[in-house]
């Protein structure tokens, strides 16, 4: 039996009062007790982790990442060039490096909206077996996109499309979902609108008919898979809601009426504000083309305004960054900073990356510090509930437990070449 006790920190979990001098006990990878230090019995033989002076929170969850994206920010490939030119081995190694950076940033769970032949399924399974120190992964093996749709237009025109790069018509979409199920999909991603970083389309365009999205949802839900809809445009969002998707990813041009529908149906919003923030602030240094930078500028304020209205309407918001080639993994917590800048409290922002994200995953044992939950624990120097930016201060994360295992020093990738990953301090 392996027992670890995190002792002396300010313990926070969604929906509960902070425990000023708390204890979190993890037994064989699962939280067995949480409480005040003076009233919580200490198991004999426990390994003690000193959390004095820290805020103790559940392991964080990023619900929208592209792990197989360029992990070497000295190289400024566009996402399309990367998809077309990178080998399977390169994509897998980049995915590993990106996942490791996410873990070192306190994100013990990632939902990877994936890349065909990108190695994420294998990385997920190796991590689940305890063979790799990377976050727990939930993987969509590939997106569903129509010919001429957002995903298709990520690729250069010269690139020879392969089977499953596109799926058209109700039957084609059903077959693509079944194929992804057969190779181990955890969820399905469908492209319901144009986008920002593809070529030749517009984010205001819809993709796929309602009937095609309905087919994807029906097929996925039959096998208990949830559906995430990439949807910027009003019509793309409308078709996705009509079809019964589980989450809207981005939601840039979402209307107030659609916010009401999402509250009524329980549909989640994954806002991904930080990718626009990175592209706008970094410009060409992000790897984006001038066309992409111009689009990001035009969309950023719409996306922020839609986020504020969605929060005010009571839409359930699950944190996601769109991290990958353009928004660096390791700087995931920038998304939470943006939420606070737009009016959420630090506790509300943290809830989007813990309990609400876990609810979208269908995993009530994640994103919480309570008996029976998975032993993912992060200790952050200082009062995180007063200053969310402490997550990105260099050296600000003192301890990271994943499944009760101390992975604080698991990172093999130096951040010295990437100062933006560690914040300004």
Image (spheres, grey):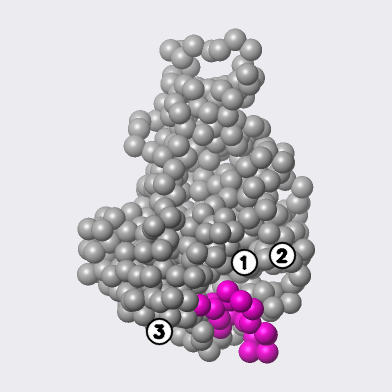
Q: Is residue 375 above or below residue 308?
A: above
Q: SS at mark 3?
A: loop
**Is mark 2 in CB contact (under 8 Å) with mark 1?**
yes
Kindly identify which numbered label has been placed on residue 115: 1
Quadrant occupied by the N terminus: top right
Q: Which residue is mark 2?
A: 91
The quarter of the displayed image where residue 304 is located: bottom left
Residue 327 position within the rendered picture, expressed as x and y whole percent measured from the top left? 59, 65
**Is mark 3 in CB contact (under 8 Å) with mark 1?**
no
Q: Is residue 199 above or below residue 122?
A: below
Q: How far, Cα to Cα, is label 2 from label 1?
A: 8 Å
Residue 291 position within the rendered picture, expressed as x and y whole percent measured from the top left? 56, 86
Q: Badge 3: how crowded within 10 Å, few (<14), some, or many (20+)?
A: some
| Sequence-wise first label, 2 or 3 | 2
Kindly identify which numbered label has been placed on residue 236: none
Residue 44 position within the rendered picture, expressed as x and y whole percent measured from the top left? 60, 10
Main SS, magenta region, reads loop
Q: Nearer the viewer, residue 105 or 364?
A: 364
Give the residue displayed 41% in from the left and 39% down from the top.
364
Give the residue displayed 44% in from the left and 26% down from the top.
371
Eye-nearest disc, 3 or 1: 1
Give the residue displayed 63% in from the left and 50% down from the top.
124
What's the magenta region? 151-167
Q: Which residue is mark 3?
A: 205
Q: Badge 1: how crowded within 10 Å, few (<14), some, or many (20+)?
A: many
């Amino acid at each position: 039996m392996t027992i670890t006790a995190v002792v002396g920190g300010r313990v926070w979990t969604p929906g509960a009062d902070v425990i000023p001098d708390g204890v979190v006990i993890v037994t064989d990878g699962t939280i067995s007790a949480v409480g005040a230090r003076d009233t919580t019995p200490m198991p004999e033989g426990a390994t003690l982790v000193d959390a004095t002076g820290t805020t103790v929170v559940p392991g964080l969850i990023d619900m929208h990442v592209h792990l197989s994206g360029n992990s070497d920010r000295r190289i400024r490939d566009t996402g399309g060039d990367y998809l077309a030119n990178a080998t399977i081995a390169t994509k897998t190694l980049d995915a590993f490096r990106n996942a490791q950076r996410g873990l070192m940033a306190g994100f013990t769970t990632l939902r990877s909206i994936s890349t065909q032949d990108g190695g994420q399924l294998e990385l997920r399974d190796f991590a689940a077996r305890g063979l790799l120190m990377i976050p727990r992964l939930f993987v969509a093996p590939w997106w569903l996109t129509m010919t001429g749709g957002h995903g298709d237009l990520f690729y250069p025109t010269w690139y020879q499309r392969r089977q499953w790069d596109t799926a058209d018509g109700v039957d084609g979409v059903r077959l693509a979902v079944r194929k992804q199920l057969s190779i181990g999909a955890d969820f399905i991603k469908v492209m319901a609108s144009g986008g920002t970083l593809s070529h030749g389309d517009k984010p205001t365009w819809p993709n796929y008919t309602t009937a095609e999205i309905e087919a994807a949802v029906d097929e996925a839900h039959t096998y208990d898979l949830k559906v995430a809809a990439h949807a910027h445009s009003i019509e793309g969002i409308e078709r996705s809601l009509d079809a019964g998707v589980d989450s809207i990813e981005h939601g840039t041009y979402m209307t107030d009426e659609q916010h009401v529908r999402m509250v009524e149906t329980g549909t989640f919003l994954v806002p991904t504000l930080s990718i626009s923030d990175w592209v706008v602030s970094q410009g060409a240094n992000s790897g984006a083309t001038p066309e992409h930078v111009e689009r990001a500028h035009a969309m950023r304020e719409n996306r922020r305004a839609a986020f504020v209205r969605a929060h005010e309407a009571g839409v359930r918001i699950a944190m996601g960054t769109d991290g990958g080639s353009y928004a660096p993994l390791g700087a995931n917590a920038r998304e939470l900073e943006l939420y606070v800048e737009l009016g959420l409290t630090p506790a509300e922002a943290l809830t989007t990356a813990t309990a609400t994200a876990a609810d979208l995953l269908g995993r009530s044992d994640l994103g919480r510090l309570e008996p029976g939950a998975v032993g993912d624990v992060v200790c952050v120097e200082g009062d995180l509930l007063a200053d969310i930016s402490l997550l990105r201060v260099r050296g600000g994360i003192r301890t990271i437990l994943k499944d009760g295992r101390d992975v604080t020093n698991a990172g093999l990738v130096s951040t010295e070449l990437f100062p933006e990953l560690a914040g300004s301090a």
